[in-house]
Amino acid sequence: MAPRRGPVPVLAKPNMQEIPKKYDHQVAEAAWRERWDEWELYRWDPSRPRHESFVVDTPPPTVSGSLHVGHGFSYTHQDLVVRYRRMRGLNIAYPMGWDDNGLPTERRVQNVYGIRPNPQLPFDPDWQPRRDKGKKEPVEEVSRQNFIETCGLLTEEDEKAFEDTWRRLGLSIDWSLTYATIDAHSRRTSQASFLDLYRRGFVYQSFAPTMWDTDFRTAVAQAEAEDRERPGAYHDIAFAVAGGGTVTISTTRPELLAACIALVAHPDDARYQGLFGKTAFTPLFRAPVPILEADHADPDKGTGILMVCTFGDLQDVEFWKRSGLPLKQVLGADGKLMALRFGADGFDTTDRGAAQAAYGELAGLRIKPARRRIVELLAETGSAADGKGTALQGEPRPIQHPVKFYENGDNPLEFLPTRQWFVRILEHRDALLTQGRKIRWHPQHMRTRYEHWVEGLNQDWCISRQRFAGVAFPVWYPIGDDGAVDYEHPILADEDRLPVDPLSETPSGYSEDQRGQPGGFAGDPDVMDTWATSSLTPQIVSGWGLDDDRHQRLFPMDLRPQSHEIIRTWAFYTIVKAWMHDGEVPWSNVTISGWVVDPDRKKMSKSKGNVVTPVHIFEESSADAYRYWAARNRLGTDTIFDTQVVRVGKRLCTKLFNASRFVLMQIERAGSDFRTVAAADIREPLDLAFVASLRDVVARATEAFENFEYALPLQLSEELFWQFCDDYLELVKMRSYGEEDIPERRSAIAALNLGLQTFLRLFAPFLPYVTEEIWSWRFAAEEGPGGSVHRAAWPVVEESAAVATPESGLSFGAASEVLRQIRGAKTQAKRSLRWPVAELSIGGDEEAVTALRTVLDDVLRAGAVAEGAAKVVVGENPGEGLFIVEVTLAEEEPAS
RNA sequence: GGGAGGUUAGCUCAGUUGGUUAGAGCACCUGCUUUACACGCAGGGGGUCGCGGGUUCGAGUCCCCCACCUCCCACCA
């Protein structure tokens, strides 16, 4: 339904009895939450055209059990922008998603239910998970599909808790648009995306060295890898050189010595000119390796010459690819050194017995023990065939160096040759940069992060994971008559069968008994990277590939709100997919929220034990107060959770409540004639001046909101509101108290009416509960959703077009200033503020005095200045403004 | 090593295009029960704007250097 438009509404039902004396946020927030649900206030209207809509790509939170006080931070920011746009009359599509796909869920399910997925098992529809399983019972193996369904069961509970928190927070989400990244619709979308990318040539499969986590035993993408500073040591190892002599290399990975395929030095390095082209021999294993030139060798590092292993690092991978040298794989997928046969499988040696014996000391060891052992062996063995000196030269030299880790991992990543699916992103970097520039980033400098990430890409996007709780690849492979799996000719699932589980379902043209048989088929056992699905959140919501009309109404979206650490994953991959599928940007704007940090500026997380639950804050101080805290922080800036600021928010709510009661009381006291007060009645100079400052705030707040800046509108509204309470209300009070229907009083009442309605709507995005409560007393034009302040029109300057511009821009300020000085005099004399003033003398330049004279009556009444006691004189110095010459307080106490 | 953001009162932060004496809130101190609000009101103290240069009549604001904090990125010999 369209929001109501038009002039400022008049009072709907003046009845003081209904206005409560105190604001109970607990009661009010619960009641409004319920009513908003009944009204379906936040429902997206699928019939309205795209250009009248505002579509948000809400971040699906990882459902991980517990929430801390930082979780609502960025969600509040989204909601502020959304509520503003809704009040501008736009049809809002604000969905919620749950990210319950991937490793975190997998680990929790294993612990809670004591089960482990075995991809080889078929789906069992009758199987039921048991929570009450004893710790000592053996871990049960279930099919992947059963495992995934159990994940859904567990995350459902957490999702309920999350939803409850978001509702309490007052997020204006349309809960009918909820999805989960592991649900059937998301799996379908994700698999359809894969098939589309396959057909368009954007994905490929390859057997190649890939980053591998030896604990999780899965491939990992560049975006999920991070450098960590770790201790290591240079080990100087001497290699014998054919024709006599030795050469010493430095390495931090001596355990990979058996995987050495070459020694390389920089082509310009004078020390090694004579060695290029010669053959060296590894100590212990006596493997002949060529000494070659390589640009990546740094003459200043180590000894300037290094060993290339398969694989120590990405440089090794790249050199190996260029060189065409044979692969020597020594590290297994489990992170242990594999059994090897020297003299076979590419493991050349000049002394098979010695090599096999030395390696026998290492086989089966994990990396660290293997390193320790080989160092011992190298210290005992001779460096060359002639046995002069030891292979290990001197003591290892400790260093600190960056090592690549999987972001969730505990041990360094290795490069292992495995078969994986990749998305081609390296060759499309320019196009992806162009896409990034079509999007408006808020704050703008966050785009730089995106660009640096795209420019720094060095691997295609590996999307296959050797895990279970994820979306399967909709792919089978034919098995040849010889029993070999033919990976080159995958059998793709039919689109209308999606989502499929290739391990439980049979490809068209085959029967289930052909699974794993020669001449039959094999299902792809892997699952997709969780980001391969999360990168489709716009398409999941829009019904991409299923409902074209809906897709057109929702895609591309208007806003992607997120935090900065996932620019390289979520934002980047979403841009990738939207470009590959539709040639479009997924959204026109990205807003980046900062982190909530603890007082030591560390990111708040439950593992650090520095958490406060948001629900606790809602109960103690109200959701509005929490939102106030969140709204005070601008986009992109980290912040500390500060209960002091929450308290300020709570105070603002109370003030708004009380000031509103007062204003409504004034209006209602004025009687029925004043129910039709109109903006045109505002004539008094003080009132004109107040409306002028209100207009200014409305204009500036609107402009800021248009740019996704919510902090400034709050600040401006708040400043003027306190001035409204402390000065304007005091100044206008006496005039509005009167009994007669005279223009001066009418003007005051009309200005108060306009002011209150404007403030309520300005604050509505920030403080949805208390503003709705107040709005409902008198301003709701109808029962039901049409009466909600959240469907009311955002204030615009045109509303007060009938109000004249004040003659002087200084009058409000002049009035406030004189009032301030009178109050100061009373406070200093330790008198109450209603103590009468016997004499008042004010001076000032002509402009200021003229301005003051227009509002002097209001000032004198508010300051309790005795009739005829004030003297205003024009001073001699232009530009000096206003000053009080003298304030003399009355001797007598004010009459009560 | 490259890059981004930051450094303003005890704390959290505003300070638009350079322009009087640098602001707010919190905290602190002193008063005031005032017909909306004591969950209030009024007043007060508190700052070499990270350091050092430069441009300018004038710099918190523009330029350069440095320091420190946070984050992002980087080929692990």
Image (cartoon, coloured by chain):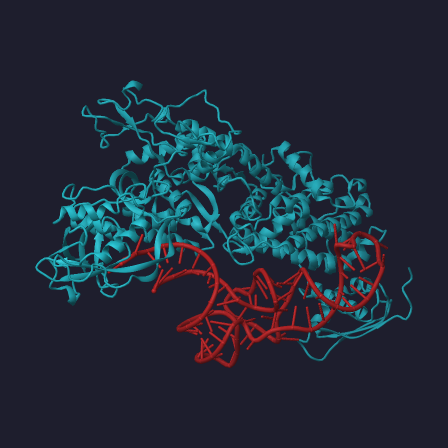
Residue A173 seen in the figure: yes
Q: Is residue A89 above or below residue B59?
A: above
Of residue A885 and residue A692, the one placed in the foreground of this image is: A885
Task: State the hue of chain A.
Answer: cyan
* Chain painted red: B
The image shows residue A505 at horizontal and vertical percentages of 35, 23
Q: Is residue A435 above or below residue A117?
A: below
Residue A681 seen in the figure: no
Q: Quadrant of residue A466?
A: top left
Q: Is residue A870 left or right of residue A424?
A: right
Q: Is residue A215 left or right of residue A633?
A: left
| Quarter of the N terminus of chain A within the rendering | top right
Of residue A648 and residue B28, the one placed in the foreground of this image is: B28
Of residue A702 and residue A595, the one placed in the foreground of this image is: A595
The image shows residue A712 at horizontal and vertical percentages of 58, 56
Of residue A336 and residue A809, the one placed in the foreground of this image is: A336
The image shows residue A609 at horizontal and vertical percentages of 55, 49
Q: Is residue A137 above or below residue A327?
A: above
